[in-house]
Amino acid sequence: MASGVAARRDGKKLVRSPSGLRMVPEHRALGSPFVLEEPPWVPDKEHHCRRCGRCFCDRCCSQKVPLRRMCFVDPVRQCAACALVSHREAEFYDKQLKVLLSGATFLVTFGNSEKPETMVCRLSGNQRYLLLDGDSHREIEIAHVSAVRTLAEGFPPGASARATGMSLQYTMPGEACVTQLKLMAKEDSSASRRQAVAWLAAMHKAAKLLHESREQ
């Protein structure tokens, strides 16, 4: 059974910032790890991009695009470069996030263990934890994942590599040592394997967003 921390539906509240209405967690520390901080408002006669915070003329900052990573309720004004990025990120929220929430079945190996365990891995509803369920239950906080590496194979020869597994490094709260987790799709041609491959691709995208939010 999931712990109260991972299973709780965190409350949200509607706030009005100078840039627009935002739906944010009641407790900031419980927000999604993929969220970007809103740039400071700079009073100016020109228009400013809600994503990068820079000022532009009306022509260069005329697009209004959804910006889910900053929790805006309505589409907001963005410069051309930021609008392009936000459009690409929309695919993650419309498609890949649903795949991560649905979960997939993997052969999971923890640390130096030689025996993998069949487990269902999925993202928690608040996007803060990886939940793994099999004979045992594990929860890994996304914010504590320090490295993600996709394991792939190319087939047939010369074809582009396709993800068949993933290696994650993470730390547990209160511990300094790094733990490794390996997820491998099962060797079959079933729908379960296809779902696992799709989940790995979605997690690869999520890892990129997580890295960007840390670099901001």
Image (cartoon, rainbow, N blue to C red):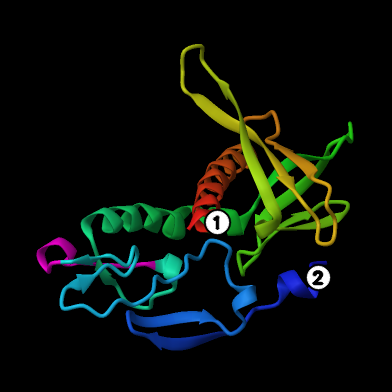
Rendered location of residue 134, percent (x, y): 82, 51
Q: Quadrant of residue 169?
A: top right
**Residue type beneath disc 2:** Ser
Rendered location of residue 25, percent (x, y): 56, 80
**Residue type beneath disc 1:** Arg
Is label 1 or label 2 in front?
1
Foreground residue among 137 and 11: 11
Which residue is label 2 attached to?
A: 3
Residue at the image position 87 percent from the left and 35 percent from the top? 112
Rendered location of residue 133, percent (x, y): 79, 55
SS category of the residue bearing label 2 = loop
Query: Does 110 appear above or below 132?
Result: above
Which residue is label 1 attached to?
A: 214
Query: Does 49 appear above or below 195?
Result: below
Marks 1 and 2 close (CB-CB < 8 Å): no
Query: Does 177 appear above or below 149?
Result: below
The part of the chain drawn in magenta is 57-67
Residues packed near mark 1 inside 10 Å, few (<14), some (14 to 19) or many (20 plus): few
Looking at the rendering, in which quadrant would you find the N terminus? Answer: bottom right
SS category of the residue bearing label 1 = helix
Describe residue 186's horizontal placement relative to residue 64 as left or right.
right
Foreground residue among 85 and 184: 85
